[in-house]
């Protein structure tokens, strides 16, 4: 059996900065390469594969640099060197991890054997990648993508976001103990799209939480939404769903990556 390798950007320890597990100690494994171009993306450096991966030094020294592609054993050593405790999360993020599903699945299987929890952050469109994981995740965080916010790098790959998100969620709830949908809301968010998001969640599993994440100024977005607008979206979502929450990104507030 061949040893999995992957193009990675970085491995580091921090606090989860978004979603229902915000604040939880987490080791992040950031994959290089994404086939979308979101207007508000705060990590556009991950859109293309990276020449090298940086491993955070557990003693606070300079990051260690490793040329890509990185083999599985090096990734695992970098994770465990950062001292996660049983029950801590390892977040597979990006970029888009499911474009390199072999490595994502291998990391998840190994860390779960050591009592850690695998948290997959994904754009929720790579259904084929999800099917290639060959193992379970503890948590799958699926971003809901809006055509008004995304410029596809591969325009013909995902012609119908909502339909693909529905298929993805149906598969995700079979592969993870917990699944939630995260939707970035901005000045382009429409009530029609909210109806679409809620319809898909209610069709697949009404218990799936919807996390409304106010857009953080980054990339092509320069301003924040006012509180009354955000609370208005929360009220609208609550009328349609069993579990809707408003949770902003916290890592920009405390200055962590």
Image (cartoon, rainbow, N blue to C red):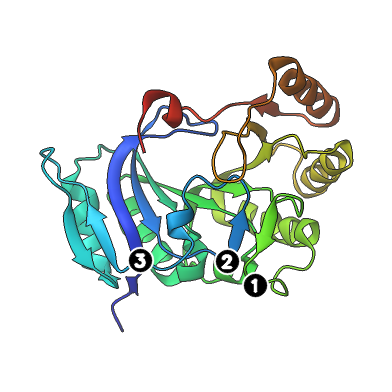
For residue 174, the mark is none
Mark 1: secondary structure: loop
Mark 3: secondary structure: loop
- Between 11 and 243, the residue placed more toward the observer is 11
The mark that comes first in sequence, 3 or 1, is 3
Q: Position of residue 173 (x, y in %)?
A: 63, 51
Which residue extends farthest top?
A: 228
- Whether pointer 3 and pointer 1 mark residues with C-beta atoms closer than 8 Å, the reply is no
Task: Tell me: residue 168, above or below residue 219.
Answer: below
- Between 84 and 98, the residue placed more toward the observer is 98
Determine the residue positioned at 28% across, 71% down: 68
The mark that comes first in sequence, 1 or 2, is 2
- Whether pointer 2 and pointer 3 mark residues with C-beta atoms closer than 8 Å, the reply is no
Q: Residues within 10 Å of mark 1 (few under 14, many from 20)?
A: few
Which residue extends farthest bottom?
A: 1
Quadrant for the N terminus in the image: bottom left
Task: Tell me: residue 166, above or below residue 209.
Answer: below
Distance between mark 3 and mark 1 Cα atoms: 19 Å
The residue beneath circle 1 is 154
Determine the residue positioned at 55% across, 45% down: 219
Q: Is residue 85 left or right of residue 185?
A: left
Distance between mark 1 and mark 2 Cα atoms: 6 Å
Q: Position of residue 213 (x, y in %)?
A: 63, 33
- Whether pointer 1 and pointer 2 mark residues with C-beta atoms closer than 8 Å, the reply is yes
The answer to whether residue 87 of the structure is visible from this angle is no
Q: Position of residue 169 (x, y in %)?
A: 68, 54
The residue beneath circle 2 is 35
Q: Position of residue 83 (x, y in %)?
A: 19, 40
For residue 50, the mark is 3
The mark that comes first in sequence, 2 or 3, is 2
Mark 2: secondary structure: loop
């Amino acid at each position: 059996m061949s040893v999995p390798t992957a193009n990675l950007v970085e491995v580091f320890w921090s606090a989860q900065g978004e979603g229902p597990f915000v604040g939880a100690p987490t080791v992040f494994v950031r994959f290089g390469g994404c086939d979308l171009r979101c207007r508000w993306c705060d990590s556009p450096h991950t859109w293309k594969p990276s020449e090298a991966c940086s491993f955070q030094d557990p003693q606070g020294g300079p990051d260690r640099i490793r040329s890509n592609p990185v083999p599985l054993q090096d990734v695992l050593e970098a994770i465990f060197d950062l001292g996660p405790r049983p029950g801590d999360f390892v977040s597979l993020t990006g970029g888009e991890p499911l474009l390199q599903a072999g490595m994502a699945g291998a990391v998840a299987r190994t860390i779960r054997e050591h009592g850690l929890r695998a948290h997959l952050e994904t754009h929720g469109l790579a259904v084929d990648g999800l099917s290639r994981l060959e193992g379970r995740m503890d948590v799958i965080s699926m971003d809901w993508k809006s055509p008004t916010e995304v410029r596809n790098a591969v325009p013909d790959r995902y012609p119908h976001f909502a339909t693909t998100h529905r298929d993805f969620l149906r598969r995700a709830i079979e592969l993870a103990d917990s699944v939630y949908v995260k939707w970035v809301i901005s000045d382009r968010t429409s009530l029609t799209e909210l109806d679409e998001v809620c319809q898909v969640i209610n069709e697949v599993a009404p218990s799936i939480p919807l996390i409304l994440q106010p857009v953080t100024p980054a990339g092509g977005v320069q301003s924040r939404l006012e509180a009354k607008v955000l609370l208005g979206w929360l009220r609208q979502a609550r009328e349609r769903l069993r579990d809707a929450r408003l949770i902003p990104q916290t890592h920009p507030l405390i200055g962590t990556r």
